[in-house]
Amino acid sequence: MSDEFISKILKAIDERHTSEREIALHLNAEQYRVHSALDTLVQKEYIKGARAWKDGKLEYAKCTLTDKGKTMLHHPEDFPQQSQPSIKQDFNFPGSNIASVTGSGHIDKATINNYPPEQRQSLTEAAQEIQELLNQLSQTYNPPSPLNNSKIATAGVEVIESNQALKSKIIKVLKAGGTETFKELIDHPAINIFMACIEAWKDD
């Protein structure tokens, strides 16, 4: 997710699209991506968010901009670049071709073995989206346990099955032979079960 996506969410809230479902619909974006962005904005005090249980999930039901968020939206020039909200991952691939997304949102090290630039980009983008999805589902199926990991993996597959664009992206990664590397890029206890569930997709 990019800084532009963050700005669009701030603008949507300013236009009175206050729940994560409304924002996702307004932006034509996946709800779990909106949820992840809202988490970041709440942590950085750009918005206030009230949560509620809906359809078995804890969602943002009403979000409002703080004074800091309003200033960021309408006068971003007043903020130094380093203080602006961002959930953008900087995927750098220097000589050793190293990069990864972890559950904490930081870059961790995992080797991506000599993939050409386009495949590296596909791997990291797909891994980031799956990381965010599994993290989102972890809020519904908790505390961590083997049973809940199975539920997270199954629910993740169901979400992807309903998102053909994301499923196509993952199939492309699997067919390119990046299964093990893809798994290494995702830091979540349900990843092994999840990968076992989607392994057959590469034969589609």
Image (cartoon, rainbow, N blue to C red):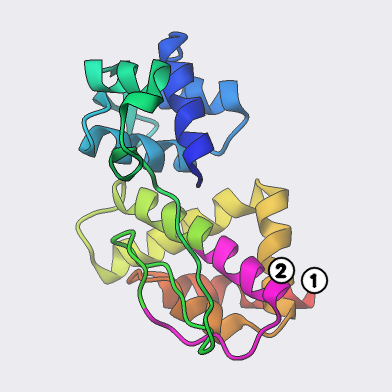
- As drawn, the label of residue 204 is 1
Which is nearer the eye, 31 or 86? 86
Q: Which residues are magenta?
A: 109-127
Question: Could you tell me which residue is drawn at 31 percent across and 37 percent down?
Answer: 80
Q: Label 1, secondary structure: give it.
A: loop
In this view, the mark in front (2 or 1): 2
Residue 149 location (% of width, % of height): 34, 65
Quadrant in the rendering for residue 16: top left
**Looking at the image, which residue sits at the far top?**
16
Taking the image as shown, residue 141 lies to the left or right of residue 1, namely left
**Dots 2 and 1: beta carbons under 8 Å?**
yes
- Kind of residue indicated by mark 2: Ile
Question: Could you tell me which residue is drawn at 60 percent across and 82 percent down?
Answer: 179
Taking the image as shown, residue 8 lies to the left or right of residue 177, namely left
Question: Could you tell me which residue is drawn at 45 percent across and 63 percent down?
Answer: 153
**Looking at the image, which residue sits at the far right?**
204
Which is nearer the eye, 81 or 154? 81
Q: Label 2, secondary structure: give it.
A: helix
Q: Residues within 10 Å of mark 2 (few under 14, many from 20)?
A: some
Residue of label 2? 171
Q: For the C terminus, which image quadrant?
A: bottom right
Which is nearer the eye, 83 or 160? 83
